[in-house]
Amino acid sequence: MEFTWGPDSPPPSIEEHSKAKLTVLRRYLRAYFDRLNISPNRDEFKLDLVDGFAGGGQFTDRSGIVSGTPLVMLEEIEAARKRLNDNDRRKPLNFNCKCYFVDKNRDHVEHLRKVLRDHGYDDAESEFLSVRTGAFEDEIDGILASIKRRQPIAGRAIFLLDQTGFSQVRLGLIARIFEELASAEVILTFAADVLLNHLAETPGIIRSVQPLQLGDRQIRELIDYRNQVGGRALMQRTLRNHIRLFTMADFDTPFFIKPENSRRALWFVHLSKHPTARDVMIQIHWDTQNTFEHYGPGGIGMLGMDGIKDPATLPVFNFKEADARKLQKQLLEDLPRVLHGLVAEGPITVDAIRFKLANMTAAPFSTLDKVIIELVREREFDVLNPNEKERNAKVLKRLSPTDRIQLHPMSLIPGFSRKK
């Protein structure tokens, strides 16, 4: 659905998908601020937030006015400033954040400017806020230049590209973001159902998907999937690696956002170059139950084609408590084999294990660590601290990123079998 705002008209009514996206964005920003500002010694936090399809800033629902993505960003910056400075810090934490709100529709921008003024924000170009009328691809040069002036080294930025269809964001632009900004993240949405249902080998459709950089073979594959059971799962796996590899993003969470009372599915893709960012987002998936789903298992290789050899029997993974129990059981079966391969030539750090496994499972790092600790207690692996001293498995409760995992000597004995 494409929303419309007018300069003097009331905000449009919000739909369930948009409400779900707003909830996820708000929770992610909150967790992001907290995770990156743990150190009490930090005195300044710089971040640039970009909304490439900002809209008019507000919606309506039965309860009244609902903040759109621009207000969510501004509200969470202010909430974090208060929350983190009230946390017995040794020194005040200065939030040096700038927001860029872009929309090509002039009426939408005028409505947004009014909303910002009503909430006490100066809508003029300033050190902390930039509202721009234009297409995202036309504004990206100036935005990237501004971010690099503000953050020549860190390049910490979050881009929200919440397009209404599937063809408005060029993957080449996302690749450029990751190439030019060291710590960028991109949240990208796709109308998955529309893409799957309307794809055809016609000149018009092929032109419309050009921004996705799909080749003829990939388009034919997606068309073939349309009439198959499990078409969404097949589409997800086909596009997932293509997007991550083309954009040069190292990590992703490519799951469908599907509110409980909605029949439609929207593809919600988070791309980043850092495993910690991916871990924060995957934890939000678990915290926001009844919002995300995945077709297939949640264990190691959950996004591989091997997991959907029979699409007709695919389970639906919903990030609920039952899925968490099933996931942990799967990891206890899958992880020993994977870890054996990783540590075969010598100990490897927990941080390196997380880096290797982040894209392969729906498990947050806390769950991976919990399973590794259980395997250590079963004498399949040992944990060494940075000083090469073995940690006591009986009292081990938490892993450090610098801990190193190695094979337990018993696991090398022929016929060894860990306890069930």
Image: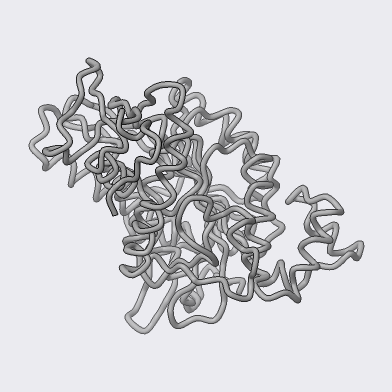
Q: Is residue 261 above or below residue 117?
A: below
Q: What residue is shown at x 37% (from left), y 31% (from top)?
A: 412
Q: Quadrant of residue 303?
A: bottom right
Q: What residue is shown at x 44% (from left), y 33% (from top)?
A: 156
- Find residue 83 and report its horizontal and vertical position in percent: 18, 46
Q: Is residue 205 above or below residue 372?
A: below
Q: What residue is shown at x 68% (from left), y 62% (from top)?
A: 235
Q: Residue furthest front?
A: 415
Using the image as rendered, state which of residue 337 and residue 259 is in the foreground.
Answer: 337
- Find residue 106 and report its horizontal and vertical position in percent: 62, 59
Name the quarter where the C terminus is drawn: bottom left
Q: Residue furthest right?
A: 203
Q: What residue is shown at x 56% (from left), y 67% (from top)?
A: 266
- Find residue 254 and report its horizontal and vertical position in percent: 54, 55
Judge whether residue 129 can be spotted in this image.
no
Judge whether residue 108 can be spotted in this image.
yes
Q: Is residue 299 left or right of residue 195?
A: left
Q: Is residue 51 left or right of residue 26?
A: right
Q: Is residue 82 left or right of residue 347?
A: left
- Find residue 104 and report its horizontal and vertical position in percent: 64, 55
Name the quarter where the N terminus is drawn: bottom right
